Amino acid sequence: MQIITPQDLDVAVRAIESGELVIVPTSRWYMICADASNAQACDSIFKGKRRPGAKSLAYVAPSLASCQEHFELSAEAERLATMFWPGDLALLLPWRSPEDAARHTAVGSPALTTVAPGVLGTLTSEAKVPVAATTANISGDAGPADLGPAVTIEEVHDFLATSGLTPSVIVDGGVCPAANHMTIVDCFTPEAKLVRTGLVHQRAVSAALGREIQRA
């Protein structure tokens, strides 16, 4: 396992392209990443995190244009993506074609999609394979003592010891300051619905849509 700085991100890019797992920092917390089209790599994340199969990994698109190539975006989805990407908003979107859906079944369903800033965004833009990501923690409610996803390298190592996962590269970005989730919006229907609140406030989502968003 290599621990590198964001300045050496090409090492992480090569690892993702080779089917390895990589952990990267975001403003929110550390994320574990894999090739979204690599079933074995993605499955290892599900197993290590003890993540339910119905709870998909995030498909991190390199740009809105790339997302439009692979997903169907309603008018409201387009509005939210234009307003908040790259950023801390994820959209549940239908695949544009059966071929796209079949290629990325490893991430789970439905497709949770975002365009990320920072190190994760750069990794996604530079990799020649699609990137799936999720938080570096064991899934589920572990009780009041659970700290949540890792925000430091020390917590990343604690997660790896518990999960048994062995990423080939960890990108050390120091302390992740926000320690909060992405907001998730369901855009499978013309009228988007709020699935989970997070760093993008519900009021901001409503303002972008020009109406009060309802919960799914």
Image (cartoon, grey):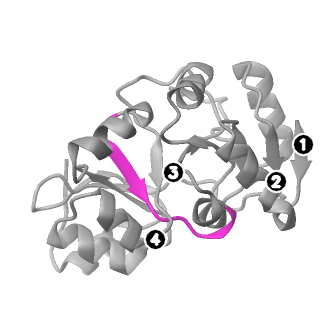
Give the mark, 3 or 2, whose residue is nearer the N terminus. Answer: 2
Please give the residue where the numbered disc 1 appears in the rendered image.
Answer: 2
Q: Are marks 1 and 2 in contact (CB under 8 Å)?
A: yes
Q: Are marks 1 and 4 in contact (CB under 8 Å)?
A: no
Q: Residues within 10 Å of mark 4 (few under 14, many from 20)?
A: some
Please give the residue where the numbered disc 4 appears in the rendered image.
Answer: 63
**Label total for image:** 4
Q: What is the three-letter code of the residue carrying label 3?
A: Pro
Magenta residues, start to end: 109-119
Please give the residue where the numbered disc 2 appears in the rendered image.
Answer: 11
Give the mark, 3 or 4, whose residue is nearer the N terminus. Answer: 4
Q: Residues within 10 Å of mark 1 (few under 14, many from 20)?
A: few
Give the mark, 4 or 2, whose residue is nearer the N terminus. Answer: 2
> Which residue does the image show at 31% across and 36% down from the upper left?
102
SS of the residue at dot 4?
loop
Taking the image as shown, residue 32 lies to the left or right of residue 132, namely right
